[in-house]
Amino acid sequence: MHERIPHGGQVAYFSMEIAIQPAMPTYSGGLGVLAGDTLRSAADLGVPLVAFTLAHRKGYFQQHLSATGLQTEDVQPWSPEEFCTEEAARITVAIEGRVVAVRAWRYDLAGLFGHIVPIYLLDTDLEENSGWDRGLTDHLYGGDTNYRLQQEIVLGMGGVRMAKALGLRVNVFHMNEGHAALLTLALLESQLGGGPLGAPAEADLEAVRRTCVFTTHTPVPAGHDRFSTEQAIRILGSDRTARLEALGCFRDGLLNMTLLALRFSRYANGVAMLHGKVSQAMFPEFKIDSITNGVHAPTWISEPVQKMLDEQIPAWRRDNLYLRNVIAVPESEMLAAHKRAKEELLAEVGSRTGLVLDPNVLTLGFARRAATYKRATLMFTDPERLKEIASKAGGLQILYAGKAHPQDEPGKALIQQVVAEAARLGNDNLRIVYLENYAWDLGARLTAGVDVWVNNPRRPYEASGTSGMKAAMNGVPSLSILDGWWIEGCIEGVTGWAIEDGADDLAEADSLYSKLETAVVPLYRDAPEKWARLMRTTLAFNGSYFNTNRMVKQYTRNAYYPERLPQTTKVEEAAYAD
């Protein structure tokens, strides 16, 4: 039943954030959820994989919104000992000349057939460390760039040393984003005998490259982790900084973690076809492939849709390609399953806000990190036109959610703008709600329960996006800009609709309105059977492809073990060759 993977070693997957389970606030958003879904599929498929991240004892943050949309934040304290097992192994890393002790908590992630993927959460909260160092693994994306670089030493260099201390046999190190890039430096120092001194030969560099692969998620230069020379010398040390500079890991006078990861990886990829091309243009001296993201189907398909699938296509859990067969499920079953998911969502909205929304009214969802390039207010470009659309639809409900990073003032202002527009435009026909504290549980409700998923980033800033994939897993079509994954997933009128590229925000808002007026509203209002067929094709075509089972198989065959196929028969080898 498992994907047959060559053994003899393990893949070690490094990510600054991993969404392990809802009660553990060890993630902030898309990157962490993608990491968690990757590990869940690796466990389902029997991939010999282990993972390293930080404990984040105080989480990311709990979001509170005032009546005007002003965001405030609280910590999310949790106890690793309630969920994990403490390992006996201890290692140390050097930070600003100090020796910092690190321990690991193990969480065993079990797959569909019992295979375990251990996740090691690195933790510096030890008595022998100073008060500052004890807090280094407390906050996900907290503090300033000094804190960030110190965390990246713990993750990258500490993770490699912890893997050795635990006796793991790792033959592939996978860096999920540049946060873990310093693992390459730890591997190089190990290759040279354990210390920072000594000039590496090309054979030493190549020995490190043979073991490393890298996934970048960032489509804009400003999004890559960069640190000043002063910071690098002070935090990493002058010898290590000099080595990194000599190896070409600085750009524009800054230590560039993406560049470091690329220089020491034998394989690198972006997370969607378009993102691979964008990344290649940003770093033309390296070969950058693409493997499009996915989501873990059993995690994100709602209970009503899972029940329908279990009755109609039970093999879907073993092999997500069988989701293609939903094309034969009766329209009535598709509508009934979605109706239950929508009722559950609206009940959740009611419990959070006291508002009673109508399950028969067309409901749009827009939920993601509150960043300016995602243009949460594009829907309000022409308020009168939006009101007219709502009137013709017999009502329109728009559900928003999303956190802004605590230091992202423009992102926070964007939330306030949405809340202000919701108050100004709301009437009997048009209901706009901003839900606070967007997290795993609310995200699952939203992607399953709305009727249309809306995404309108400024192209090409969306590396991939996965929330629309989660919606598709539930038969919910997207109305989105052709960026990230959607350029691959959009079949007009079959899996959703494209917001056409325009010269500016006004033109793209006009396209959004036009698609609502001419395609979405008439179909939803007048043709429920055709709408049900649209939901079926959305799930069949996009659900069967944009899943992490397919994605992990691609990583296995293209990144982890490209030189050899799994142990197969001659007939199966011929099939792979096709």
Image (tube, rainbow, N blue to C red):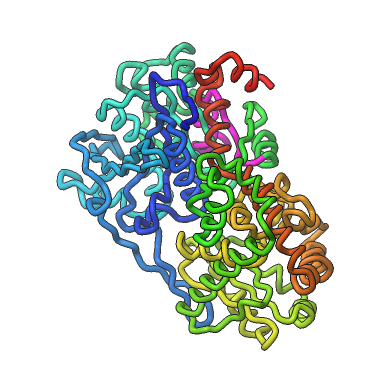
The question of residue 62 being in magenta is answered with no
The question of residue 258 being in magenta is answered with yes
Residue 172, picture quadrant: top left
Where is residue 205? Give x, y as percent: 47, 17
Tell me where the magenta segment starts and ends, as one range: 249-272
Q: Nearer the viewer, residue 118 or 407?
A: 118
Where is residue 535? Give x, y as percent: 68, 58
In the figure, 559 relative to 437: above or below?
above
**What is the quadrant of the C terminus in the image?**
top right
> Would residue 210 appear left or right of 126 to someone viewing this image?
right
Q: Would residue 510 be visible to someone looking at this image?
A: yes
Which residue lies at the image location 71% right of the left edge and 81% below the top edge?
395
Q: Residue furthest bottom?
A: 428
In the figure, 149 relative to 456: above or below?
above
Which residue lies at the image location 55% right of the left edge and 45% below the top edge?
316
Q: Nearer the viewer, residue 448 or 10?
A: 448
Where is residue 277? Give x, y as percent: 70, 37
Q: Residue furthest left?
A: 127
Q: Would residue 506 be visible to someone looking at this image?
A: no
